[in-house]
Image (cartoon, rainbow, N blue to C red):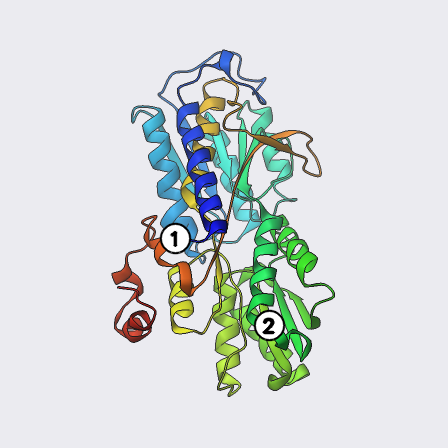
């Protein structure tokens, strides 16, 4: 394991331990923001609402939901009930789901917003009903009580550095395409900002897109347009903000007849993305350990539901949203995932087994990099 990875792994382990230990602390021992509308403390018999934004990206259903549910169960002796809904990328549906959570009188609400700005009114309604709100993964607007995510500018910087590494001397010999995420997601702007802080002045951006709803098919259509506009042989690399879009981009590049694909970035370490990395079609992804993020959200939600403050060991920093200042926050470090460290990251952490990655289609490629 290289030095950068070791530092990230130590940071993740330390912060995960802090989240675990914080569950044992009392309100007197903790700092951060409390829910002023919940004067009376509650026991473990809680109802926690969980609203996730979509199910096209594998992480939400496969990782985030079970991690949060498990941690809430651990913190409450199995007595708390998690009420779950997925908005399927529909902001209007998510607003309706918040109304349902209010009707169901949940004790706290964890929201990963489809649209961070439009959710503000729903967050206010929940708050007015005495329900504290934890913004998960995306910084929702409105009077949120806490926030947990990754260092999203660092995600972009990691992607940008990896792309420059892959390009080498080719960085000045052609143009790159930037495939950013959806403008409704505040994280997409942070990824873009981080990436550009590394790439500006070192590459020429031939085409740049903000991809509607993060959909792979939209990224595919954008990439087809970029190939038509720039010429397939003039594109030396592609900045893709996540793995799903990278899949659509790579499909377009293959369809253009390119024998050697330019390096393409990604994010989320989705199984299909990891397999493309093994096969040499995608250069990298960003591995974001989901357990510390989900466990922090669960810990925050349970504390707030019980009328307690959030422990300072969980909310280790604060952020400002466009509507709320000083939101107690926990940010998880990230790791650049390439062929070289698949074994030391997603396999070692139990995200995937080698057997899941190295199916028949990818066995020869796995053997070539010693992945068994």
Q: Which mark is residue 137?
A: none
Q: How many marks?
A: 2
Residue 324 percent coordinates (x, y): 68, 32
Residue 76 locus on image (x, y percent): 34, 24
Could you say which is closer to the camera, residue 7 or residue 125? 7
- Residue drawn at the location 57% of the way across and 66% of the way down: 165
Q: Is residue 128 visible?
A: yes
Judge whether residue 222 can be spotted in this image: no
Residue farthest along the front direction in this orientation: 3
Q: Relative to 20, say whether 206 is above or below.
A: below
Q: Quadrant of residue 44?
A: top left
SS at circle 2: helix
Instruction: Identify the residue at image location x=30%, y=24%.
Output: 77
Please give left or right for residue 80 compared with residue 301 in the image: left
* Residue bearing mark 1: 345
User: At 62% from the left edge and 77% from the top edge, which residue is drawn?
Assistant: 170
251 shown above or below 131: below
Specify few, some or many for label 1: CA neighbours under 10 Å numbering under 14, 14-19, or 20 or more.
many
Where does label 2 land, which residue? Answer: 168
In terms of sequence position, does the residue under pointer 2 or pointer 1 come before the other? 2
* 7, 263: nearer the viewer: 7
Residue 28 vertical position relative to residue 335 in the rendered view, above or below: above
Task: Tell me: residue 4, above or below residue 176.
Answer: above
Q: Residue furthest right?
A: 201
Q: What quarter of the picture does the C terminus occupy?
A: bottom left
């Amino acid at each position: 394991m290289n030095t950068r990875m070791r530092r990230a792994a130590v940071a993740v382990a330390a912060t995960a331990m802090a989240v675990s230990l914080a569950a044992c602390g009392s309100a007197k021992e903790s700092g951060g923001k409390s829910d002023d509308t919940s004067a009376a403390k509650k026991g473990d018999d809680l109802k926690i609402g969980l609203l996730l934004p979509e199910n096209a990206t594998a992480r939400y259903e496969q990782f985030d939901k079970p991690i949060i549910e498990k941690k809430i169960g651990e913190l409450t002796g199995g007595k708390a009930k998690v009420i779950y809904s997925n908005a399927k990328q529909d902001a209007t549906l998510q607003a309706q789901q918040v109304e349902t959570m209010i009707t169901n009188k949940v004790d706290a609400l964890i929201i990963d917003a489809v649209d961070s700005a439009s959710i503000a009114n729903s967050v206010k309604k929940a708050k007015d009903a005495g329900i504290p709100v934890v913004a998960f993964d995306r910084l929702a607007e409105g009077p949120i009580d806490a926030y947990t995510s990754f260092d999203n500018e660092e995600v972009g910087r990691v992607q940008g550095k990896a792309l420059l590494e892959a390009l080498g001397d080719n960085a000045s010999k052609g143009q790159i395409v930037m495939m950013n995420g959806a403008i409704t997601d505040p994280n997409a702007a942070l990824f873009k900002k981080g990436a550009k802080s590394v790439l500006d002045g070192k590459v020429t951006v031939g085409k740049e897109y903000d991809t509607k709803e993060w959909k792979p098919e939209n990224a595919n259509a954008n990439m087809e347009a970029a190939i038509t506009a720039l010429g397939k042989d003039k594109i030396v690399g592609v900045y893709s903000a996540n793995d799903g879009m990278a899949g659509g981009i790579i499909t377009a590049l293959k369809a253009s007849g390119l024998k050697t694909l330019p390096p393409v970035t990604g994010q989320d370490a989705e199984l299909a993305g990891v397999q493309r990395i093994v096969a040499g079609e995608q250069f990298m992804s960003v591995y974001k350990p989901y357990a510390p993020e989900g466990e922090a959200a669960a810990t925050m939600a349970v504390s707030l539901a019980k009328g307690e403050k959030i422990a300072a060991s969980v909310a280790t920093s604060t952020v400002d949203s466009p509507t709320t200042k000083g939101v107690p926050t926990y940010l998880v470090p990230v790791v650049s995932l390439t062929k070289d460290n698949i074994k030391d990251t997603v396999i070692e952490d139990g995200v995937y087994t080698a057997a899941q990655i190295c199916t028949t289609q990818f066995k020869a490629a796995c053997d070539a990099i010693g992945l068994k």
